[in-house]
Amino acid sequence: MKKINLLIILCCITMAVSCQNNNTSTTNSTFKKPTAMESNKVIKNEEEWKKVLSSEQYNVLRLKGTEAPFTGKYNMHSEKGKYTCGACGYELFTSDMKFDSHCGWPSFDKEIGDGSRIKKIKDMTHGMVRTEIVCARCEGHLGHIFDDGPTATGQRYCVNSLSIEFLPTDTTKKK
């Protein structure tokens, strides 16, 4: 009987401490001001995306499809400028970051800025473990990133042409 009473007392103490810890973390939390990226998010429902994207772009950017290799308009593209998200126009890459990886899709060794323009998400589809890349502003699917790039970064952002647009140098603006 003493063991049962002791067990009940220990359970009550554990629950009390647990509840107290939860309350403390709630009362001590402060309001976090959204970052510039969080306040610039592009949020649309699927019907709105269907209205602004071609069916091919919608398949890649929203349904995570992939264009056939060696068919994209930016695969062998070498003009100077910036590559933006095909859904929201967010600047992602420059032509100086692009290289020919002979994989059939445009490849870049890094993104513009500090690494916050593209979200990396673990992708375990198709029996593989890969890292999916999506636009941080609209979450449009861009492609995948691999650690087999030939440049100093060692990275290869393998991107669908359908998920990006190109702005020649003379027309690029900060977005």
Image (cartoon, grey):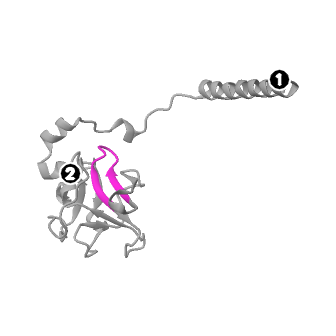
Image side of residue 133 versus residue 34, left or right:
left
Q: Callout 2: 10 Å neighbours few (<14), some, many (20+)?
A: many
Decide: is 17 above or below 57: above
Which residue is nearer to you in this view: 60 or 78?
Answer: 60
- What numbered label is drawn on residue 5? 1
Magenta-colored stretch includes residue 137: yes
Q: Residue at x 33, y 38 (%)?
A: 40
Q: Residue furthest right?
A: 2
Q: Residue at x 30, y 55 (%)?
A: 92
Q: Quadrant of residue 168?
A: bottom left
**What kind of residue is marked 2?**
Gly
Start and end of the magenta stretch? 131-144
Which residue is nearer to you in this view: 158 or 92?
Answer: 158
- What numbered label is drawn on residue 86? 2
Residue 164 in sight in this render:
no
Magenta-colored stretch includes residue 159: no
Q: Please provide percent x and percent y for residue 12.
A: 75, 23
**What kind of residue is marked 1?**
Asn
Which callout, 2 or 1, points to the residue nearer the camera?
A: 1
Q: How many numbered circles does the render carry?
A: 2
- What numbered label is drawn on residue 38? none
Considering the image in quadrants, where does the N terminus appear? top right
Asked if marks 2 and 1 touch (Cβ < 8 Å), the reply is: no
Image side of residue 13 versus residue 149, left or right:
right
Q: Quadrant of residue 81?
A: bottom left
Image side of residue 157 versus residue 46, left or right:
right
Residue 111 in sight in this render:
yes
Q: Earlier in the sequence, mark 2 or mark 1?
A: 1
Dot 1 falls on a residue whose secondary structure is helix
Q: Residue furthest front?
A: 1
Q: Please provide percent x and percent y for residue 29.
A: 58, 29
